Image (tube, grey):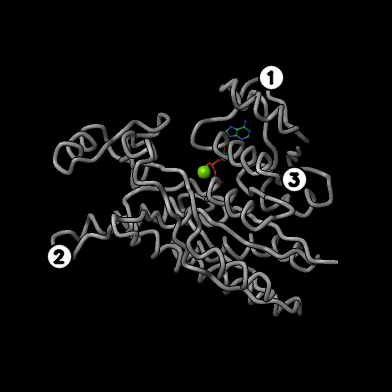
C-alpha cells in the first residue's frame, strides 16, 4: 500500500511557549516537543510535509534591525522570511533527526527554502492588513507611520503594530523539489511562514516583495498540490469551538465542509487573523478535492489521530 501523505501546519505555540521562553534555545526545546508528537505519525507510516509559522521570529529580526539601524543595513521582509525558514528549519530538522535516531526510525528530515509566488495585482497590496513586528504605543506607531510610511493598526486590544499586505499564495516555486524529497522518504520542512512572497517582474523574473502570506492558506495550497490525504493544522487549542470564549462555548468533534462554510460566513465564531484563516484554509483544501482535515494541538495529536479528539472536517 502506498504511504499516505499529510501536510502539517504548526503554529506559533510549537516554537514559543510564552513570553518568558523566547530565546533561540527555548524555541529549540519547544520545537523538540512538537517533533516528539509528529514522529509518531512518521512511525505510523505517514509521509510528512511540515509548514511552520514565523511571525514572532520575523518580529525579532525586524526589531534587531531597527535597533542597529545606526550601524547596520536594514533587513528587508523577504530576507526575514528566508532567515527564519533557515533557522527554524534547522531547529526542526535537527530535532527530527535526533528523534529518528532515538526511536530507531529509518527516516530523515530536510528543509527547503521555499518561495511562494503571489500576484503583483492582488488587491491585498492596496489594503495592508497583517500585523508584524513588535507592539508599540499609539504615539510611536503614528510616528513610524509618518516617518517611514508604515501602515499601522491597533491589534485586538494588545497594542499598535505595523501592518503589511497579505496576498494569496498562488504557486509554490520549489514544489517539484519538495515532491521528490517526500518520494525519497524525507520529512520535508517547507513553505515556512507561508513561503517567501515573490512575484514575477515584467521579464518573468522572480523578485521578493514586502508582504506576509498566511501560513495556513499556504499549507492548504501545498496539501492540494501534493494530493495530501490529510491536512493537519496544529495550534494552541485542542479543538475548534462555537461561540469561542463565550459562556455558551461548545467544542466541535467534527464539521462538514458545508457547515464550516456556513459558520465562517456567519462571521462570529472564528476570530479574524487566528481561527478564521484556519477554517478558510481547510475549506479551500476540501473544496479542491482534499479528503480530510484536522485541527488540534501538538499535545493532542496522537489522541486525535486515534479519533479521540481534535476537530475533524470532512467533505
Ligand atoms: P497559530 O500560531 O497556530 O496560527 P493563532 O493564534 O493564529 O495560532 O490561532 C489559534 C487561536 O485561535 C487559538 O489559540 C484560539 O485562541 C483562537 N480562536 C479563535 N476562535 C476560535 C474558535 N472558534 N475555536 C478555537 N480557537 C479559536
Ligand atoms: Mg496564526
Task: Give the vertical position of 136 relative to 110 (above or below).
Answer: above
Q: Residue at the spot x=40%, y=29% of the render? A: 157
Q: Earlier in the sequence, mark 3 or mark 1?
A: 1
Left or right: residue 207 compared with residue 294? left
Q: Is mark 3 within 8 Å of ligand 1?
A: no
Q: Nearer the viewer, mark 3 or mark 2?
A: 3
Q: Residue at the spot x=46%, y=64% of the render? A: 85
Q: Nearer the viewer, residue 200 or 68?
A: 200
Left or right: residue 207 compared with residue 195? left
Kind of element beneath mark 3:
strand
Q: Nearer the viewer, residue 178 or 154?
A: 178
**Which of the 4 quarters of the picture holds residue 165?**
top left
How far apart marks 3 and 1 lie (CA) works out to: 27 Å
Residue that extends furthest to the right in the rendered view of this protein: 1
Q: Nearer the viewer, residue 76 or 173?
A: 173
Kind of element beneath mark 1:
loop
Q: Nearer the viewer, mark 3 or mark 1?
A: 3
Kind of element beneath mark 2:
loop
Residue to which mark 1 is pinned: 248
Crowd tier of the residue under label 1, counting other residues whose Cα lies within 10 Å: few below 14, some 14–19, many 20 or above: few
Q: Can you give x and y, in whole percent of width and height, for residue 289 in the image?
A: 70, 44
Crowd tier of the residue under label 3, counting other residues whose Cα lies within 10 Å: few below 14, some 14–19, many 20 or above: many
Q: Nearer the viewer, residue 290 or 263?
A: 290
Query: Circles 3 and 2: CB distance less than 8 Å?
Result: no
The circle on residue 292 is: 3
Quadrant assignment for the N terminus: bottom right
Q: Can you give x and y, in whole percent of width and height, for residue 90 in the image?
A: 50, 71
The circle on residue 71 is: 2
Task: Give the vertical position of 163 relative to 26 (above or below).
Answer: above
Q: Earlier in the sequence, mark 1 or mark 2?
A: 2
Q: Can you give x and y, in whole percent of width and height, for residue 41 in the image?
A: 75, 62
**Number of labelled discs?**
3
Amino acid at each position: 500500500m502506498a504511504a499516505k501523505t499529510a501536510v502539517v501546519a504548526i503554529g506559533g505555540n510549537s516554537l514559543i511557549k510564552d513570553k518568558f521562553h523566547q530565546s533561540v534555545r527555548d524555541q529549540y526545546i519547544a520545537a523538540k516537543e512538537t517533533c516528539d508528537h509528529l514522529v509518531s505519525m512518521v512511525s505510523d507510516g505517514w509521509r510528512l510535509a511540515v509548514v511552520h509559522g514565523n511571525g514572532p521570529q520575523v518580529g525579532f529580526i525586524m526589531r534587531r534591525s531597527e535597533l542597529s539601524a545606526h550601524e547596520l543595513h536594514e533587513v528587508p521582509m523577504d530576507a526575514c522570511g528566508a532567515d527564519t525558514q533557515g533557522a527554524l528549519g534547522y531547529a526542526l530538522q535537527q530535532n527530527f533527526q535526533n528523534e529518528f535516531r532515538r526511536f530507531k526510525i529509518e527516516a530523515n528530515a530536510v528543509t527547503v527554502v521555499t518561495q511562494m509566488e503571489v500576484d503583483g495585482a492582488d488587491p491585498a497590496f492596496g489594503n495592508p492588513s497583517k500585523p508584524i513586528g513588535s507592539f508599540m504605543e499609539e504615539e510611536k506607531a503614528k510616528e513610524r507611520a509618518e516617518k517611514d510610511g508604515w501602515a499601522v493598526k491597533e491589534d485586538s486590544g494588545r497594542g499598535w503594530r505595523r501592518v503589511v499586505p497579505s496576498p494569496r499564495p498562488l504557486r509554490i516555486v520549489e514544489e517539484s523539489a519538495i515532491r521528490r524529497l517526500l518520494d525519497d522518504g524525507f520529512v520535508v520542512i517547507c513553505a515556512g511562514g507561508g513561503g517567501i512572497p515573490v512575484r514575477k517582474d515584467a521579464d518573468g523574473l522572480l523578485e521578493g516583495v514586502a508582504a506576509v502570506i498566511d501560513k495556513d492558506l499556504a499549507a492548504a495550497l501545498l496539501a492540494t498540490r501534493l494530493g495530501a490525504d490529510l491536512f493537519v493544522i496544529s495550534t494552541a487549542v485542542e479543538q475548534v469551538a462555537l461561540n469561542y470564549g463565550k459562556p455558551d462555548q461548545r467544542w466541535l468533534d467534527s464539521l462538514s465542509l458545508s457547515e464550516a462554510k456556513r459558520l465562517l460566513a456567519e462571521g462570529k465564531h472564528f476570530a479574524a487573523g487566528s481561527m478564521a484563516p484556519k477554517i478558510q484554509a481547510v475549506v479551500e483544501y476540501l473544496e479542491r478535492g482534499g479528503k480530510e482535515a484536522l485541527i488540534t494541538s501538538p499535545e493532542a495529536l496522537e489522541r486525535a489521530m486515534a479519533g479521540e479528539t481534535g476537530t475533524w472536517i470532512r467533505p
